[in-house]
């Protein structure tokens, strides 16, 4: 669980500039989901081993009218899902009514807030910042986001101590996920004595010289498979969660939930335990549903982190949007196994179905390892088969792969199709070893491997995928020069 830092302030004070500096624009997820805000962006920041999520909340200027009020409210609600707020003001423009309106709002929140005066480059920062003390939000941190000035000091002196403290707090709190796991464990406490051994952690990888010849799934009898249902608003997450829970033979153990987290629902089906990570919050009790709560990017990112398998739901009637691809990108970067469900497949005519399939081929070509299911959550069609792909994806991700096997497959691939010559010498792959699970990692050693073209890397990847019979999970291949 990563602390969430929200950047708040009027338009043009420099929030995006600071966002880019903090996240180095890596992995920015642009969330222009309908009904949310103009352009809220989410990114991951890392500073001296401190990791946190940064949210650029989009502009609020406190003078909104009509529809703008609603949008500003959405931005303000986004503050609620943050742990820390950086409130930016423009030192050059001076104090405005809008700054005061935002400050009033922030003072009412019981949340660590730092006041940051931006654009102090080329001006006398101290005198230009003085008037912001009247906002009664404590010290005014002076920065020039565009040039990086003062940013390290802001991080070192203000942000990082709070982030460290929050990180420690999150680590100490037993998360709802852990509670759910404990619950699953206790469900089996009464099972016949001496039955299955509880394996809670993945076994270490044997790095070399191992004897086993076959790839096989490690038996994880009592480890529940954690899968997250993610997708844009209205794709059918709630309907699908209910449908999956309503399936015959499913035993559900209800869990209470809190606001920002997803709801974790332990269940079992056909002797396999699962924990559904329900981002739609279907099972949350005694909760007043708010539009913003129904879809939260932070919640979705957290769910991806917590899951073994991500079940991405798409709406057949809406096609694939950039947000869908962003979510998929996040899941891929996190190394998660992926299953795709194209929902609302009921009542579509053949022409539309063909169109949707063509679009999937075109836009999801990069993730050809994921199983795609065409389902109707409303009618239940195809829902039962999702479990098969979830189990398959999980087993693929945790498959035990031996060094002798990955080397043998590498040699077969090289014999079938040699790597190209570079500067008169042929690239040579020498041996490979298994580098870990979840997702499966393979390390290949050889000569001039730095020059290996992407097309050959893709060829190897597909070769491994077929030879190891691995579906639903990315495979990571690393190349190392020499022995
Ligand atoms: P946002 O609307 O709050 O996200 O603001 P932006 O990050 O888009 O910045 C608004 C404008 O202020 C842009 O033209 C930036 O180049 C400029 N700006 C941002 N940071 C600084 C700074 O530190 N110094 C100066 N002089 N200009 C800056
Ligand atoms: P969520 O926001 O992702 O949780 O989406 P909901 O589960 O609330 O569904 C949004 C709307 O889509 C509701 O009106 C559902 O009845 C409808 N819906 C969900 N699944 C299906 C489906 O398989 N077929 C059709 N036709 N409508 C569906």
Image (spheres, helix red, strand yellow):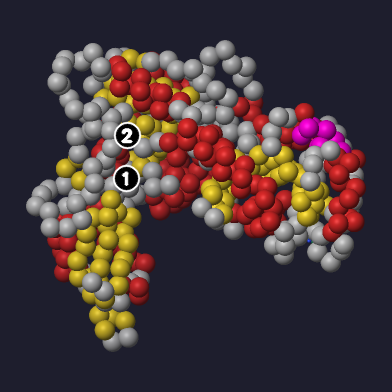
Q: Position of residue 410 (x, y in %)?
A: 20, 63
Residue at image point 63% right, 36% down = 83
Where's the C terminus, which quadrant? bottom left
Q: Position of residue 290 (x, y in %)?
A: 64, 23
On screen, residue 89 versus residue 386, left or right, reads: right
Q: Which residue is labeled 1 in the image?
A: 438
Q: Which residue is labeled 2 in the image?
A: 390
Residue at image point 28% right, 87% down = 424
- Of all residues, the one furthest to the bottom in this rendering is 424
Q: Is residue 265 above or below residue 299?
A: above
- Pick whichever, 289 or 380, lies toward us: 289
The secondary structure type at the circle numbered 2 is helix
Report if residue 378 is visible in the image: no
The secondary structure type at the circle numbered 1 is loop
Cβ of mark 2 under 8 Å from ligand 2: the answer is: no
On screen, residue 378 versus residue 309, left or right, reads: right
């Amino acid at each position: 669980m990563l602390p969430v830092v929200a950047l708040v302030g009027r338009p043009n004070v420099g929030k995006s500039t600071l966002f880019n500096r903090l996240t180095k624009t890596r992995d920015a997820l642009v969330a222009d989901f309908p009904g949310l805000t103009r352009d809220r962006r989410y990114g991951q920041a890392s500073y001296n081993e401190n990791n946190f999520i940064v949210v650029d909340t989009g502009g609020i200027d406190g003078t909104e009218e009509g529809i703008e009020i609603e949008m500003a409210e959405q931005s303000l609600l986004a503050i609620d899902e943050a742990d820390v707020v950086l409130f930016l003001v423009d030192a050059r423009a001076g104090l405005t009514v809008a700054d005061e309106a935002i400050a009033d709002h922030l003072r009412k929140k019981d949340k660590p807030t730092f006041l940051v005066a931006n654009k102090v480059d080329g001006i006398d920062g101290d005198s230009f910042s003085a008037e912001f003390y009247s906002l009664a939000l404590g010290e005014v941190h002076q920065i020039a986001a565009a040039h990086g000035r003062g940013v390290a000091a802001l991080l070192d002196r203000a942000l990082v101590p709070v982030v460290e403290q929050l990180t420690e707090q999150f680590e100490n709190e037993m998360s709802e996920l852990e509670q759910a796991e404990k619950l699953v464990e206790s469900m089996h406490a009464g099972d016949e004595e001496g039955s299955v051994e509880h394996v809670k952690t993945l076994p270490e990888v044997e790095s070399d010289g191992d004897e086993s010849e076959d790839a096989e799934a490690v038996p994880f009898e009592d480890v529940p498979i954690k899968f997250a249902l993610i997708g844009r608003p209205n794709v059918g997450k709630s309907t699908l969660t209910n449908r999956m829970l309503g399936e015959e033979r499913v035993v559900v153990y209800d869990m209470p939930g809190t606001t920002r987290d997803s709801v974790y629902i332990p269940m079992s089906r056909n002797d396999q335990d699962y924990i559904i990570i329900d981002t739609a919050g279907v099972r949350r009790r005694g909760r007043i549903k708010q539009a913003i709560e129904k879809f939260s990017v932070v919640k979705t990112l957290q769910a991806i982190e917590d899951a073994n398998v991500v079940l991405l739901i798409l709406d057949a009637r809406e096609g694939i949007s950039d947000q869908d691809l962003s979510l998929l990108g996040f899941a891929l970067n996190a190394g998660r196994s992926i299953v795709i469900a194209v929902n609302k497949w009921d009542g579509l005519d053949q022409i539309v179905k063909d169109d949707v399939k063509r679009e999937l081929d075109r836009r999801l070509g990069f993730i050809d390892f994921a199983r795609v299911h065409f389902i109707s959550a409303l009618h239940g069609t195809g829902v039962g088969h999702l479990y098969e792909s979830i189990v398959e994806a999980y087993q693929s991700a945790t498959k035990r792969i031996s060094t002798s096997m990955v080397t043998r497959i590498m040699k077969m691939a090289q014999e079938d199709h040699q790597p190209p010559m570079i500067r008169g010498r042929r690239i040579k792959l020498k041996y490979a070893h298994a580098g870990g699970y979840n997702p499966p990692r393979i390390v290949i050693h050889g000569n001039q491997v730095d020059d290996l073209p992407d097309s050959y890397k893709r060829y190897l990847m597909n070769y491994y995928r077929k030879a190891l019979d691995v579906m639903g999970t990315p495979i990571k291949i690393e190349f190392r020069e020499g022995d």
